Image (cartoon, rainbow, N blue to C red):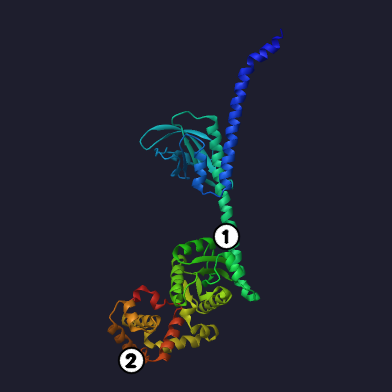
Amino acid sequence: MDTTLNTTNEHRPDNFGQLADRYALLLGQHEMEVRLADRLGSGCEFPEMFAAIAESTDLPMWVFDTRGQRVLRSGDRELAPPDITSMCTEGRREQRGSQFMIAHTPNGVARRCLVERIDGASADEFLGWLVMGEIGRTFRQLDHFLMDRGAVYLARHCTLHQAMHRSIADLTRGFVERLLRRGEQGESTVEDARRLGIASDSSCIIVAIDDSALSRGVGDIDSLTFSLNKLLAGKVFGARTPRGPVLIVDHGAAERTEDSRLIEEVCRGLSSVLPDSGVQCGVSSAVGVDAITEGYDEALEVVACLERFIADHTRILSVRDLGPARILVANGNIAAIRRYVEHTLGPLWSEEADSDMEILMATLAQFSRMGHSVRRTAAAMSVHENTVRQRLARVRRLTGLDMLNDPFAQLSVHTALAIIALRNRAHPLWDPRRAH
C-alpha cells in the first residue's frame, strides 16, 4: 500500500475546507467590489454610497468628520455612536489601514471598533473616518476587507464629484466667455446661451466687476456665483475675463415692467456678498439673450465711469442709476462735472451740510427714485405726503429746483444724484443715517 497516497487522502478534507473558505471569502470580496463599483458609477450621492457599503454587513457603521463628529449612520436602529475624538489627534491621524480601538458611547458602554481613514486624492487631504462597531458578533475577515474598500470608495466618490464640479464649472465659464465675445464677432448668442441653460426668451442682467485693487480679487468666481444663487431668484453664471470677473444673471422670461425690480435685486445681492472696499461694480439694464454682449458693454461703461472718481469703498451702480449721466461722465471734463453737481444742488450738497439739509437731500433722492411720485415717496420714507411736499417746497426755495412741476429740474437732479454715487461719498439712499 502506498503510504504517501494515504497521507495525502487523510489531509484532503481539511484542504477542501480551507479552499472552500478561501473561495467563499474571495467570492464575497468580488461581489462586494462589484456592488460598490456599480454604485459609484451610478452617479449616486455620498449618503447613497455609504448605504451601499453598510448594506454589505450586519454590523453598525458610521462616518465621522475630521473632528470626530458623526456625519452618517447605518440602519434604522439608532445606536449610540462611539466616541472617536482620540483618533483625531495628529499622531493617530497619520496611521494608515484599519485600526482597532476601544471606544465608549455617551452612556458609558465600551465597544470594540474598527476605524479606517478616508483620504482624499492628494497625500495631505484627510476627509474623515469610517467606523464599524463590534455588536452581536466578532469581526470577521470580510469586515476588514469591507472597511478597507469602503474607505477607498468613499474617497473616490469625493474625488470624482470634485472633478465633475470642476469640469462643469470650466464648461460654464467657457460658455460665459463665448457669450460675451459672440456679439463682437457678429454671431448669434442664442445657441451658446441654450447650452448654458439660458432660454432664448430670457431676460438677463450683466455685471462687470473691477477687483484689481484687491490683492486676491473677489476670490473664487464659483464661490461668488454660489453665494449669489442663494440670494437671487435668477440663475447666476460667472467667469473671470481679462477685464475682470463677469456675471450673467438669468431671470427667465420676465416682463419688461419688472426690469427695475430685477436690477435692484441684483444690486442688493452684490452688496451682500462683495467686500466693503476695493471693488467697483457695473450693472447693465435687463437685456435679451441676443443682446448679452451689448449688456456687457453697458456694464463696462458704468465701471469706467466709476473709475473716473476715485473711492476706497465698494460701489455698485447700474445703468439705470446713472441714466444720461453715463454719457456725461464717460466723455466730460471731471472738474466741470463736479461744478455741475455743486451748482445744481447748492447747499444741499456741501461738506458743511447739517442734518436738516441731509433730510432734504434724502427726500430729493427718494423722490427722484420713486418716479417723482409724492405718494410713493411718502410710503418709502414712512412719512405723510404733506411732509414730502413741504420738504420739496424748501428745496425749491434753497436751490430754485421745482421738482413737482419742472421736467428739466427733475432730469438735472437725477443726473446730479447719479454723479454723486460715483464720488468718494455714499449715495444718500444707501446711507442708513439719511433714511428718513
Residue 104 visible in rendering: yes
Position of 267 with respect to 388 (left or right) is: right
Name which quarter of the figure residue 3 lies in. Answer: top right
Label of residue 169 in the image: 1
Label of residue 397 in the image: 2
The CA distance from mark 1 to mark 2 is 57 Å
* Closer-to-camera residue (418/369): 369
Indicate the secondary structure of the residue bearing disc 1: helix
CA neighbours of label 1 inside 10 A, class few (<14), some (14 to 19), many (20+): some
Give the amino acid type for the residue marked by disc 1 in the picture: Ala
**Quadrant, the N terminus:** top right
Give the amino acid type for the residue marked by disc 2 in the picture: Arg
Q: Residue furthest top?
A: 1
User: Cβ–Cβ below 8 Å for labels 1 and 2?
Assistant: no
CA neighbours of label 2 inside 10 A, class few (<14), some (14 to 19), many (20+): few
Q: Is residue 199 above or below residue 84?
A: below
Whole-percent x, y for residue 64 in the image: 46, 43
Point 70% across, 12% down: residue = 4
Whole-percent x, y for residue 9 in the image: 66, 14
Q: Is residue 369 above or below residue 74?
A: below
Indicate the secondary structure of the residue bearing disc 2: helix
Position of 14 with respect to 104 (left or right) is: right
Front: mark 1 or 2: 1
Residue 220 visible in rendering: no
Identify the mark nearer the N-term, 1 or 2.
1
